[in-house]
Image (cartoon, grey):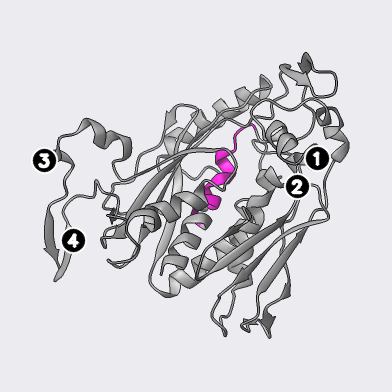
């Protein structure tokens, strides 16, 4: 089913945006793992709604409750299940879209697939709300990776056409997780903030790009062809709603280079084989090279906007105008940064 990911470490996400709860079950975790719940809560707060005037006004604490898989604070070998209870859902805001799907959303495709029985409130299982349980699993994965000397970090690469300082593909990768807008160059904070505020004031939205880097992955991780490390990362990253593209290393820019420009010369660094440059983004042939893994993820503008939009009545088969109510992020990118880190961590942990 589409709500599961992984082979060695499997996650199964459940719930809907306005259901009683959302959550995740994780199978395959080693027994005896002590989960640092304070670190996990801090990670989840980076994604939680209601923390900024530039985000949705929905107020949710997003505190996970572990209902199985822990004994005296440690994993016990049983499937680990955590739930987050939905406390601030306003389902009445979605009554109008039962008959008139929102442009840019999964309302229509879900209506067709599930023959009209899909849960429409808050987007149901297609909502960005489901990234909260993804981040529970990802936050735990980050702790496991840290014990192996692997670090995952990310920043807003671009927002509304405003670009942050990009990562150097070979590092270093500064930690900006503590900022309201996680960017490297502080000079772009106010222009980005103004762009989001302007879109919100105009009942519109903006998109952007998140850049993620992973340090400390040893060479030799991954498989050829269909189970490559890029494939695995891309698959789970595309599970984040609103993702429309992903590129690794030089990405699409490599198409404009010559081979002599794009190839990364091998060298010795403290006795280890490395590359002088990192256009390949840490992965060759689907297998890690020992260099940092660097990729960028593109997010479309939030489709739920308050501007009147054209749609179609499903019952009357007539065109009409839809005005969306409810509380929505004018820019998904601000809260998507930890989601990308969570996805990368889960893909790498499973591959390891």
> Can the viewer see residue 51?
no
Q: In this view, does 102 lie above or below 46?
A: above
Query: Which badge, 4 or 2, comes first in the chain's sequence?
Result: 2
| Residue at 72% over, 62% down | 63
Residue carrying label 4:
274
Along the horizontal axis of the image, is 231 left or right of 316?
left
Q: Are the two marked residues, 1 and 2, in contact with CB atoms closer than 8 angstroms?
A: yes
Cα separation, mark 3 vs mark 1, equals 53 Å
Residue picked out by circle 3: 260
Task: Find residue 279 and report its horizontal and vertical position in percent.
Answer: 24, 46
Span highlighted in magenta in the image? 330-341
Q: Which of 208 and 317 is in front in this view?
A: 317
Task: Give the Cα distance between marks 4 and 1.
Answer: 50 Å
Dot in front, 4 or 1: 1
Residue 215 lies in what quarter of the image?
bottom left
| Residue 17 numbered tag | 2
| Circle 3 residues within 10 Å: few <14, some 14–19, many ≥20 | few
Left-right relation of 160 to 84: left
Q: Quadrant of the C terminus?
A: bottom left
- The first of marks 3 and 1 along the sequence is 1
Gap in angstroms between the C-alphas marked 4 and 2? 45 Å
Circle 1 residue = 121
Left or right of 75: which side holds 225? Answer: left
Q: Label 4, secondary structure: give it.
A: strand
Task: State if disc 2 and disc 3 touch (CB < 8 Å).
Answer: no
Q: Position of residue 93 (x, y in %)?
A: 84, 33
* Dominant secondary structure (helix, strand or loop) of the stretch shown in magenta: helix
Q: Nearer the viewer, residue 171 or 252?
A: 252
């Amino acid at each position: 089913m589409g709500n599961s990911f992984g082979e060695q470490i499997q996650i199964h996400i459940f719930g809907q945006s306005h259901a009683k709860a959302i959550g995740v079950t994780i199978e395959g975790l080693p027994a005896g793992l002590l989960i640092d719940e304070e670190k996990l809560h801090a990670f989840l707060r980076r994604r939680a709604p209601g923390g900024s005037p530039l985000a949705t006004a929905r107020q949710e604490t997003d505190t996970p409750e572990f209902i199985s898989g822990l004994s005296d604070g440690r994993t016990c070998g049983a499937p680990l299940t955590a739930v987050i209870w939905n406390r601030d859902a306003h389902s009445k805001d979605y009554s109008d879209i039962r008959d008139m799907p929102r442009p840019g959303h999964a309302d229509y495709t879900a209506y067709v697939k599930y023959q009209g029985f899909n849960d429409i409130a808050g987007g149901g299982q297609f909502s960005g709300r489901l990234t909260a349980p993804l981040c529970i699993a990802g936050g735990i994965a980050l702790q496991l990776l840290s014990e192996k000397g692997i670090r995952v970090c990310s920043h807003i690469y671009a927002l509304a056409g405003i670009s942050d300082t990009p990562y150097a593909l070979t590092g270093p990768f500064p930690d900006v997780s503590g900022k309201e807008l996680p960017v490297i160059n502080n000079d772009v904070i106010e222009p980005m903030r103004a762009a989001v505020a302007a879109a919100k004031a105009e009942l519109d939205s903006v998109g952007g790009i998140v850049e993620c880097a992973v340090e400390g992955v040893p060479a030799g991780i991954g498989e050829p062809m269909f189970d490559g490390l890029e494939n695995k990362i891309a698959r789970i990253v595309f599970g984040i709603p609103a993702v429309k593209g992903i590129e690794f290393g030089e990405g699409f820019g490599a198409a404009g280079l010559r081979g002599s420009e794009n190839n990364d010369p091998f060298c010795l660094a403290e006795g280890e084989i490395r590359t002088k440059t990192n256009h390949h983004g840490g992965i060759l042939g689907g297998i890690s090279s020992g260099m940092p893994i660097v990729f960028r993820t593109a997010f479309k503008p939030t489709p739920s906007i308050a501007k009147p939009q054209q749609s179609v009545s499903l019952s009357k088969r007539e065109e009409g105008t839809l005005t969306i109510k409810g509380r929505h992020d004018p820019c998904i990118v601000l809260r998507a940064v930890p989601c990308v880190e969570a996805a990368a961590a889960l893909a790498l942990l499973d591959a390891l």
